[in-house]
Image (cartoon, rainbow, N blue to C red):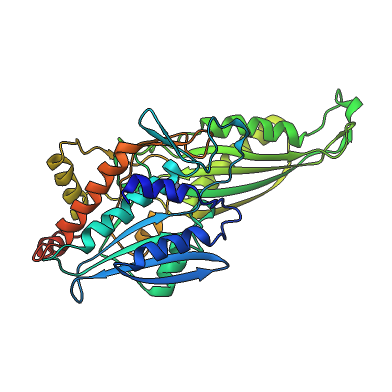
Amino acid sequence: MDAIELACKLIEFDTSNPPGNQRECADYIADYLKSFSNVRIYEKDGVRNVLAELTFSRGEPTLAFNGHWDTVPWSPEAWVTHPLKPVIHGGWLYGRGAADMKGGLAALISAFEDVSGLEGLEGKLFLMAVGDEETGGFKGTRHLLSRTGLRPDYVLIGETTDLLLKVGRRGIIQAKLKVYGDEMHSSRVYLSYVSSIEICSELTLLVKRLDPGDAGDIMPRTTFAVTIFEAGVKENVVPRVANMHIDIRNTPKVSSRDVEALLKRELERLKEKYGEFKYELDVREAAKPYIIRDSYFVRVLEDIYRKLGLTPTHDAGGGASDGRFFVEEGVRNVVEVGPIGKNIHGINEKVEAESILQTQRIYREAAIAILRSGGTDFARKSCT
Ligand SMILES: [Zn+2]
């Protein structure tokens, strides 16, 4: 079976998350891998995580391929094709998870299979096929790292990157805000009063424009987006309370303390305009940001790109990924490379079929470059 056929096979399983506890896809992957590698299952609250291992020699170096089998939910109405019936049309493979990330996962598994038959390699190659990525990754990659104690020297994640080298990710900070205003009859708004709805509405527009000036050449600035807004109890009552959730994606230059200070500054300004009001603000870090462009692994992948006639381009946009769990454990050589995809999390999600085979080649070459006998001294010396 080639990587495109394998991607089709994986798309046919409904792995919507939530609920994210379906066993069939993970079991299929485990069975497939068992014929040429050692496979263990690490389950957490019904989420089945597969860890496969190829042992070439004891000890270093260790390289891990990482991909997730869960997808976001789907409803078939708006799709041209059925989300669980993979179709290739005009060079694109359509289906839920085609781009995020059953295409990349199939390429990782196929490259892992390619490498299993090679000689003259040292160390170990792991393949992690995990769940729970779409709901935080704590029952997936995080659980697998905690249970096994595995800290690979190198990590290659197969999320769709349009063949860019993803060398960083912004973090996630979650801010919950409760604003208290005056409750009153809606017919009396000609009187002076403090409106929690007006304050939160204005804040929604203000935070969208907040720019801490931290944009880099490959990483966008820290962004603030209001994603939940709740207020109101009755048609003819101006409500006392308004609740907001602000989803913040931060660069390594902006901490959760900075975010809290910025939001408080805006709230104090709003007090000058609307009058004194009470509020409760809860700011929490949900994922740490990182950017690592100077690792040995980045250079290895750049060389492979040139060898394959591709131009290596760095990128650090988009949302968070499981990459952060490795960075949190001190792994510096973490890179994400994946196929070309469109409409991720949307209708008619698709992945360019040929780019699945291209990434399979990149993964295979990366494993050979890292695990080739004698190829690691340079790695250890140049890792900082
Ligand atoms: Zn993904």
Return the residue found at the far bottom. Answer: 58
x, y percent for residue 39: 37, 70
- The answer to which of 143 and 14 lies nearer the viewer is 14
In this view, the residue in front, 28 or 350, is 28
Q: Please give the count of numbered marks on the rendered protein.
A: 0
Task: Decide which of 306, 51 is in the foreground and name it.
Answer: 51
Which of the 4 image quadrants contains residue 82?
Answer: top right
What is the residue that sits farthest to the top in this orientation? 190
Could you tell me residue 167's position as x and y percent? 30, 47
**In which quadrant of the rendered image does the C terminus lie?**
bottom left
State the image coordinates of residue 209 (x, y, percent, origin top left).
52, 30
Compared to residue 168, the image places residue 32 above or below, namely: below
Q: Position of residue 333 (x, y in %)?
A: 26, 57
| Residue 101 in view | no
Q: Nearer the viewer, residue 213 or 45?
A: 45
Which residue is pictured at 48% across the width and 36% down the height? Answer: 349
Asked where in the image residue 34 lies, by quadrant, the reply is bottom left
334 vs 148: above or below? above
Q: Which residue is found at the position 14% from the left and 45% from the top?
A: 303
Q: Is residue 114 visible?
A: yes
Above or below for 338 versus 81: below
Say which residue appears at 17% left-offset and 49% top-offset: 299
* Residue placed furthest toward the left: 374
Q: Seen from this angle, which residue lies furthest front?
A: 1
Relative to residue 322, is residue 374 drawn left or right? Answer: left
